[in-house]
Amino acid sequence: MEQIDREFKANLLSIRETFLELLVADFDQKTSASKQFTEALRQEFKKRLHAPITYACELLSYTWQLQLASVQNQDQLKQLKVFFKHKIEEILEHQRGGSGGMSETAAAQLFEEDWVQYDKSFKVRLGKTQKDARQIAEEVNLVFNHGIRSRRTTRHFQVLEQVNAAKLLATTSDVQLSRLPDDRLASDYLSAREASLSGSVVEAAAAEVKELVTVVMSRWRDIVSGAGMQFISQQDAVDIMMEINLTLEECEEVLKERGISFSSSPVPFLNAAHLELRWIAFDHFVQREQRRVKEQLASLHKFKSSMRDEFMSILQRQKGDVDRASIVGGRYEESIEEWLDNLLVGFAADVRGQVLKDMPDASSAAERAYQH
């Protein structure tokens, strides 16, 4: 299930990026020679081109998540029933030849023991699918580092550090630019050009600089939060990095007007700002993963009461061999249905794989369609 979810999200993201590139390229081709479109107007329209495709992808992603949640609940309940089905069969086999159903106290105690066993195995399986903080840090850095490499010739990108997972994991919120006290930001990154300028003037300038940076960081938080269950794209990362680079130039103008500059160069300040961008994304996806695990556990435990009632009802109502045979027969029928389901799913997967294998190259499909 997790693998299918990841593949779907990756493919949806790839489709979105591909169509955006095609749309922008087509727009450039049709407007580059037009006198009605100034460069500023063209750039403004380019930003608006993203909205309909992004909205369509977000709607599709939301629909997918609803469907996925429904399937996961069904799958979880199915696994739970299979587990307790085997437990009931073991108990019935052990009690063969006896008379009378099991007492409520004994059935309840057996259920709690079996539930603890299932809960433990479920947490082990869940732990194997859970992303740890290092894995998330590596995924965030992969997106940002690739974005930096794709823009190496662009101003400011040439001096950016390609952060590793260890550095991102060691970063805490109290050392980020947007959260530094004004005096700390002033002492770490700024210096007065003239000795006559007081420390309060430098701190006031630091407060203005921090406000400019905070605006970008707040917008980035909104973008990351709005991603839903998707991961950030490389284009999202490049766009926000370019925005923080432009903000640096605004900061330099503000400092210049007040006779202040960056202590040695703006590079440490710029890299600190970019590190905060990464940390915001990293922190969001760590918390999202933790929420996912909690929701999975909560989903499991909401089935406990109904499963307990079914378990106890079966063990208490069986009175003899006829009742046991009826219960086992019903379970056998369910097993046959499960086997048929798995057989059909496997057959469908084989057919899908063969169809995809025999299909012509999809990358040139648009060109072939256009030619015909």
Image: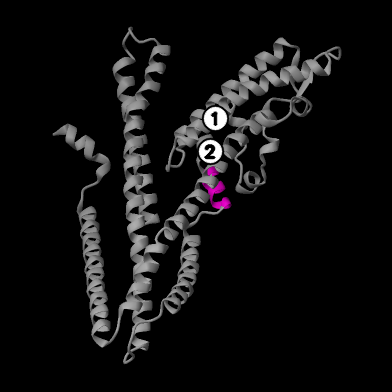
Disc 1 packing (10 Å; few <14; some 14–19; many ≥20): many
Q: What residue type is labelled 2?
A: Phe
Q: Which residue lies furthest to the top in this view?
A: 35
Q: Which amino acid does label 1 sit on?
A: Met
Secondary structure that dominates the magenta span: helix
The quarter of the displayed image where residue 307 is located: bottom left
Relative horizontal placement of residue 294, taking residue 32 as reference (left or right): right
Q: What residue did someone put label 2 on?
A: 144
Given contact means CB atoms under 8 Å apart, are the residues at marks 2 and 1 in contact? yes
Which of these two is toward me, 8 or 325?
Answer: 325
Q: Residue at x 23, y 65 (%)?
A: 341
Q: Residue at x 62, y 44 (%)?
A: 168
Question: With respect to residue 27, does 356 lie above or below?
Answer: below
Q: What residue did someone put label 1 on?
A: 241
User: Horizontal and vertical percent for residue 114?
Assistant: 45, 74
Q: What element carries label 1?
A: helix
